[in-house]
C-alpha cells in the first residue's frame, strides 16, 4: 500500500536520505519489532523506532514505573509512578505516532516465555538489564532465526552489536563472564546514546541500508569520548550456537 499524504509529510525529513525513499519507509511500516525491556535502553529504542514509522512494536517488561527510573527512562513521566511500564509506554508512543501498533506484553523474559513472545517478529532488540535474561533472549532468537540487536550500558560506557548466527557470533560466543552486573550506575545520556545506536542498527537492517554491526562490537566510552569497533568471531564450542549447542 502506498504512503498516505500524512505519512509523506511526517517522514519527509528522513525519506530523502540516500536509499531510504518511499520503499524504505514502507519497509519500516511493514516491520514487526520486539523490544525486550522498557527501561533506559528500551525508552530510547521505542521512542525512535515509533517516531521513524515502524508499524508494529511489541514492548515487553513486567515492571512498574519507580521514581528511581526517571533519571534515564525517558518514556515515563512523574505521574506514571506506580503504573505498569508497558501500559504507560504504549499510551505515550501512540500519542507520538497514532499509526504505530504498540503491543504491550507485561511478562518477564525467561526460558518458557521467550520463544512465544519473540516469534513472529522481524528483529528483536535486547534492552534487558541482566545477563541471564540476555542469554535467554539470545537463545530464543537463535532458535527462531531472528536477528537481535544487543546493547548494554554501565556508567558512561556501553556496547552493542547485531547478532544473527550463523553469519555472526552470538552473545555467548563473546561474553563468558557471568558475574552479576545488576543495578549499575547509569546516567540517562548513556542509555539514550546506546539506545539510539540500537535503533539505528534496527533501521539499517529493516530497510537494508548501510553497514550493520554484524560480526562487530561497538564499544563506547562517553568520558573519552571514544568509539571503538572490534571484530568478533564465532566460538565453535559456544554452548548456544556452536557445534556442541545444547
Ligand atoms: Zn554463540
Image: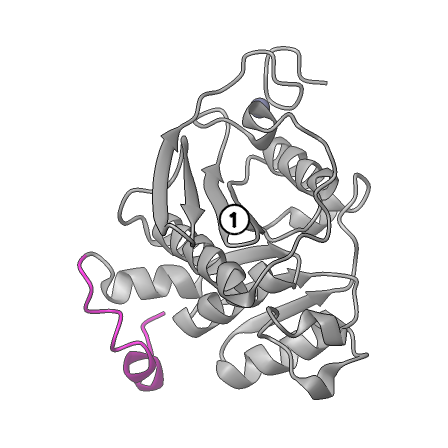
Residue at horizontal 49 percent and vertical 24 percent from the top = 166
Residue at horizontal 61 percent and vertical 36 percent from the top = 144
SS at circle 1: strand
Residue at horizontal 64 percent and vertical 82 percent from the top = 91
Q: Quadrant of residue 67?
A: bottom right
Q: Seen in the image, is 17 located left or right of residue 103?
A: left
Q: Quadrant of residue 199?
A: bottom left
Residue 29 lies, in percent from the top left, at 42, 66
Q: State the residue in front, 104 or 191.
A: 191
Q: Seen in the image, is 130 located left or right of residue 220?
A: right
Residue 181 lies, in percent from the top left, at 70, 43
SS majority, magenta = loop
| Highlighted range, magenta | 1-18
Q: Residue furthest front?
A: 224
Q: State the residue in front, 163 or 232.
A: 232
Q: Is residue 127 magenta?
A: no
Quick one: quadrant of the N terminus?
Answer: bottom left
Q: State the residue in front, 244 or 185.
A: 185
Q: Seen in the image, is 62 located left or right of residue 223?
A: right
Count of picture labels = 1
Q: Vertical placement of 177 versus 222: above or below?
A: above
Q: Which residue is mark 1?
A: 123
Residue 100 lies, in percent from the top left, at 52, 74
In this rendering, does residue 98 appear at all?
no
Residue 77 lies, in percent from the top left, at 65, 83
Q: Seen in the image, is 81 located left or right of residue 188?
A: right
Where ligand 1 lies, by quadrant? Answer: top right
Q: Vertical placement of 132 versus 24: above or below?
A: above
Q: Vertical placement of 13 versus 226: above or below?
A: below
Quick one: quadrant of the C terminus?
Answer: top right
Q: Residues within 10 Å of mark 1 (few under 14, many from 20)?
A: many
Amino acid at each position: 500500500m502506498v504512503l498516505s499524504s500524512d505519512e509523506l509529510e511526517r517522514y519527509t525529513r528522513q525519506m530523502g536520505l540516500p536509499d531510504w525513499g518511499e520503499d524504505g519507509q514502507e519497509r519500516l511500516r511493514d516491520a514487526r519489532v520486539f523490544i525486550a525491556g522498557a527501561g533506559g535502553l528500551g525508552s530510547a529504542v521505542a521512542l525512535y523506532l515509533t517516531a521513524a514509522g515502524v508499524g508494529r512494536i511489541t514492548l515487553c517488561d513486567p515492571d512498574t514505573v519507580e521514581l528511581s527510573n526517571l533519571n534515564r527512562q525517558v518514556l515515563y513521566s512523574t505521574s506514571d509512578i506506580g503504573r505498569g511500564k508497558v501500559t504507560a509506554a504504549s499510551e505515550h508512543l501512540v500519542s507520538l505516532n497514532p499509526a504505530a501498533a504498540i503491543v504491550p506484553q507485561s511478562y518477564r523474559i525467561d526460558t518458557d516465555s521467550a520463544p512465544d513472545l519473540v516469534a513472529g517478529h522481524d528483529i528483536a532488540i535486547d534492552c534487558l538489564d541482566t545477563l541471564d535474561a540476555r542469554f535467554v533472549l539470545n537463545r530464543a532468537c537463535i532458535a527462531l532465526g531472528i536477528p537481535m540487536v544487543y546493547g548494554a550500558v554501565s556508567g558512561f560506557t556501553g556496547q552493542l552489536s547485531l547478532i544473527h548466527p550463523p553469519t555472526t557470533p552470538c552473545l555467548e560466543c563473546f561474553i563468558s563472564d557471568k558475574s552479576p552486573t545488576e543495578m549499575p550506575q547509569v546516567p540517562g545520556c548513556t542509555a539514550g546514546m546506546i539506545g539510539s545506536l540500537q535503533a539505528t542498527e534496527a533501521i539499517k537492517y529493516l530497510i537494508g541500508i548501510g553497514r550493520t554491526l554484524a560480526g562487530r562490537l561497538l564499544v563506547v566510552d562517553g568520558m573519552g569520548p571514544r568509539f571503538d569497533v572490534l571484530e568478533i568471531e564465532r566460538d565453535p564450542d559456544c554452548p548456544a550456537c556452536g557445534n556442541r549447542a545444547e
